[in-house]
Amino acid sequence: MSILARPARPRAGDLALVEPDARAWDGFVDAHPQGSLLQRSAWGALKAEAGWRPRRLAVLAADGSLRAGAQLLIRRQYGLAVAYAPRGPLLADDDAANLLLIDGLTRIARGQRAIFLRLEPNITEEQPGADYAHTWLLLQGMLAERTIQPRSSVHVPISRPTEAIFAGFSKGHRADIRRAERNGVAVRVGDESDIPAFYAIMQSTGARAGFGIHSEGYYRAAWRLFQPRSRLLLAEIDGRAVAAHMVFADAGSGRYLYSGADEAGLKAGANHLLEWQAIQWAAGLGCERYDLWGIPDALGRAAGADEAERAALERAAQADPLLGVYRFKKGFGGHVVRYLPAYDRVLIPALYGLARRRIG
C-alpha cells in the first residue's frame, strides 16, 4: 500500500472516506510501508496536549481494507487554523484513493478555516516511486515547501546480529562506548518517576546549547502515551544521572527524539553508550532501522548531488550549528537520507505568506 509504482485506477464507487477509531488506525499505520510514529494515534494525543486537534481520515475499499489515510493536526487561533499531516499522508498504490483522500483532507481543513493544508509524506528521495509521488502531488496544485520535521536524517540498519551492528560503528564510536563502560558509566531503564531527573538534564542541555525544550509534562505524556514502545534510558556515574535519552519505536523504526547530557556525561562518553543501548532495544523489538533524526539539510542534499555540487554543500554545512550533531550521528554507521519536501495546498491566499513564516 505505497505509491511505489504507477497506480491502477479503481472505480470511484469502490472507495469511501471514513474516520477510523484509534485501534483500526494504528493497525493500518503499522502495516503501511510509509507508516511512522508521527502518524500513530498516540502522537495525535501527545500533540493535543500542546494545543493541536487530531483528525484521522482514511479511504476504505469495498473489501473492508484501508487503502490510504492521514492523521491531520489542526491548530486554531483568532478564528483561523493551520492543518498539518506530520510524516503523512500514507498513500495508496492508486490515484483514485489518493485523490479521494487529498480532497477529504482539504474539506476538513476548509471546514476549520485553515489558511493552508500541509502534507509531509514519509517518503525518502532514494525510494522507488519518490519522483512519481512528488510529481503527482504537484499536479494536484500543491506547492513544494520547507518541512517542519527534519528533512535529512541518518538511518542505521539494525535488522542484523548485534555484533554486526556494533562493527558498523566508527572506530572512534566503538572506543567511546568501551571507554564509558570502563569509566563506570552505568545505564538503567527509567520509569515515570525518573521524568524529573530527565527533565533537569534537558533543562541543563538546552541552556548550554541554546535550544528550546518542551515542558516536563510533555515529556511525561510522551513516555506514557507510547508505552511499551517508548524507553527512558539514564546514564549514571556513582548513582548520579549525567545523561538521558527518551527514544521510541514504531513498527519499522526506532526513533531518537529527546536527549541531553551534563558536562560530566559528555566527558565520559555517556551519550555514545546510551545510543548503543537504545539501538539494541529497537533491534530487539524487530525494527529494521534506527532513525537518528535531524542533521544539516545541506548534507542530505549533498548525498544525491554530483561531485562539484556536493563539495559546495559540504562546505556550506560547516557553518551549520548541527554539524557536531551530524558527526555524532554518522559515527553509528548509518547512511544519510533525505525526505521529500512538504506540500502545501493554499486555502486563504491573502494570509498564506504570514502563516507560512510563523509555522516554519
Image (cartoon, rainbow, N blue to C red):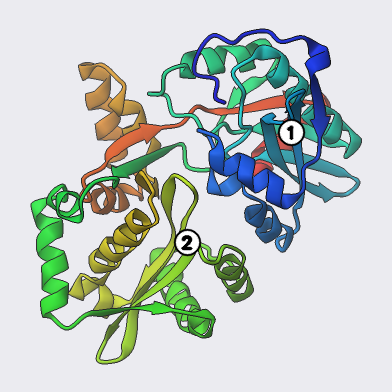
Q: Is residue 162 visible?
A: yes
Which secondary structure lies at badge 2?
A: loop
Front residue of 250/205: it is: 250
Seen in the picture, residue 285 relative to 302 is either above or below; the reply is below
Which residue carries the number 1 mark? 58
Q: Is residue 243 left or right of residue 246?
A: left
Which quadrant is the C terminus positioned in? Answer: top right
From this viewpoint, which residue is outermost toward the bottom? Answer: 238
Residue at figure coordinates x 39%, y 64% from the top left: 209
Whole-number angstrom distance, CA of label 2 to CA of label 1: 36 Å
Q: Earlier in the sequence, mark 2 or mark 1?
A: 1
Q: Is residue 323 left or right of residue 177?
A: right
Residue 112, position in %: x, y? 88, 40
Three-letter code for the amino acid on which mark 2 is drawn? Phe
Three-letter code for the amino acid on which mark 1 is drawn? Ala
Q: Which mark is residue 211?
A: 2
Front residue of 116/271: it is: 271
